[in-house]
Image: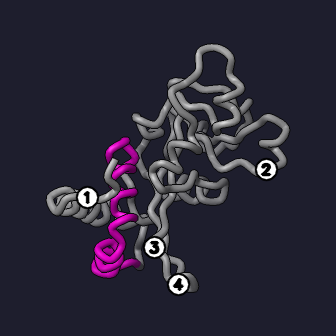
Amino acid sequence: MSKTLTDTEKETLINILKTRFEANRHRHKDIEWSKVLVRLEANPDKLWSLNEMERTGGEPDVVNYDQDEDLYTFFDCTKESPKDRRSLCYDRAALDARKKFKPKNSALDMATEMGINLLNETQYKLLQSLDPVDTKTSSWIETPEKIRTLGGALFGDFRFDHTFIYHNGAESYYAARGFRGALSI
């Protein structure tokens, strides 16, 4: 698979991202689109990854600018866990451990293929503070190695006006659980 977008694909994606950026100013009050655009145009590999986020239903949007690192960060901001990234176990080890009814992929493998990272707990809570998401679904999040070594993995959702972080066996998968990604440019 080519990790390069055609000029038409770039233009389409940039228009989608700009429209979403302008419609959701509360996610990035002090960030200027013109500066984000310059960064996007200078990083075609990251633009490809953003296109993958969009293609799989993530609706990526800018949520942060780190002045010290000079990085803009995009998160999947779709209301529910991205539609084309559900029914996945947590990682390759969990996928390999399943004897029956294996899912098609794992969240970490798919994120790696897309060139993005799973949201960590802090990022997930930041996203929830901007817009409640995962009110009917849930999303795998980056899991600390100690928990993963013991066979577990973390996921989050929003219920009862509260963000919850839970645990599950890493090999589990559900039609309503996917993952959300982050990409810094």
- Quarter of the image holding residue 177? top right
Bin the neighbour count of mark 3 within 10 Å (Cα to Cα): few under 14, some 14-19, many 20 and up.
some
Q: Residue visible at 67% across and 42% down? A: 164
Q: Which residue, given by chain and number where applicable, does mark 4 sit on?
A: 67
Amino acid beneath label 3? Tyr
Give the CA distance from mark 3 to mark 2.
27 Å
Can residue 56 be seen by looking at this rendering?
A: yes
Q: Which mark is residue 145?
A: 2
The mark lying in front, picked from 1 and 2, is 1
**In the rendering, at what x and y percent does residue 130 appear?**
49, 58
Give the secondary structure at mark 2. helix
Which mark is first along the chain, 4 or 2? 4
Q: Which mark is residue 18?
A: none
Amino acid beneath label 1? Leu
Give the CA distance from mark 4 to mark 3.
9 Å
Quick check: 164 above or below 97?
Answer: below
Bin the neighbour count of mark 2 within 10 Å (Cα to Cα): few under 14, some 14-19, many 20 and up.
few
Q: Residue visible at 50% across and 52% down? A: 181
Which mark is first along the chain, 1 or 4? 1
Q: Which residue, given by chain and number where applicable, does mark 3 sit on?
A: 72
**58 left or right of 142?**
left
Q: Which mark is residue 5?
A: 1
Quick check: 80 above or below 62?
Answer: above
Q: Is 56 or 134 nearer to us in this picture? A: 56
Amino acid beneath label 4? Gln
Give the CA distance from mark 4 to mark 1.
28 Å
**In the rendering, at what x and y percent does residue 37 appear?**
29, 75
Check the picture and name the quadrant holding the C terminus. bottom left
